[in-house]
Image: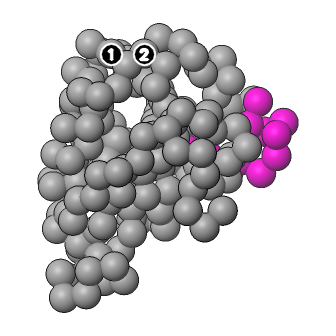
Amino acid sequence: MDQFLSHNAEETEAFAESLAVQLKPGSVVALFGALGAGKTAFVRGLARGLGCEGEVCSPTFAVMHEYPGGLSLAHFDMYRVESWESLESTGFFDYLGGAHVLAVEWSENILAAIPEDAWRVTISSGDETAPGEGVNSRLITAEEGTHAHPGC
């Protein structure tokens, strides 16, 4: 388990970029955290670390964005996914085990579909986890291949 205390979006991106070297085709990065926690900033760093092209932005309304690169990235936002049928309609299952790395925001909405070997990245407010570090700080915990997300 890796933990990192980020003080801003740039540090969050740099941490994610360093994590990207451990990923391979078919890797899944399941992201957990509240609204505004920094999940999309984390994915920007992943994309940079994977050598992806294009501006990374939240796929909230599109549900999925694809970024080609050295190792292509499929970026999913499961915020609005409320059923197994709506999950199937996102194309998520078509990408599992394929040539892309998958980054999945709001993974807590699709826990049953997250592979056991997925990276689980939790981003928590630094105010709650590291008092005195400032309102923009975030504690980022990255665990590879755990079988359950804490608190589930």
Residue 50 in view in this figure: yes
Residue 103 inside the magenta-drawn segment: no
Residue annotated with mark 1? 71
Residue 60 can be seen in this image: no
Q: Residue at the bottom extreme? A: 132
Image x and y of residue 74, in percent: 47, 26
Q: Nearer the viewer, mark 1 or mark 2?
A: 2
Residue at position x 64%, y 28% in the image: 92
Q: Is residue 131 above or below residue 40?
A: below
Which quadrant of the view contains residue 131?
Answer: bottom left
Number of marks in the rendered image: 2
Which residue sits at x=16%, y=45%? 14
Q: Residue at x 75, y 29 (%)?
A: 89
Relative to residue 57, is residue 146 drawn left or right? right
Q: Is residue 109 above or below residue 124?
A: above
Q: Amino acid at mark 1?
A: Leu
- The residue nearer to you, when weighing 76 against 143, is 143
Look at the numbered discs 1 and 2 and tell me whether their residues touch, using CB distance below 8 Å. Answer: yes
Query: Which part of the image, by quadrant, shows the C terminus?
Result: bottom right
Residue at image coords 37%, 19%: 24
The magenta region covers 77-88
Is residue 47 depicted above or below 31 in this figure?
Answer: above
Q: Is residue 49 left or right of residue 25?
A: left
The picture places residue 151, in percent across and down from the top left corner, at 60, 67
Q: Secondary structure at mark 1?
A: loop
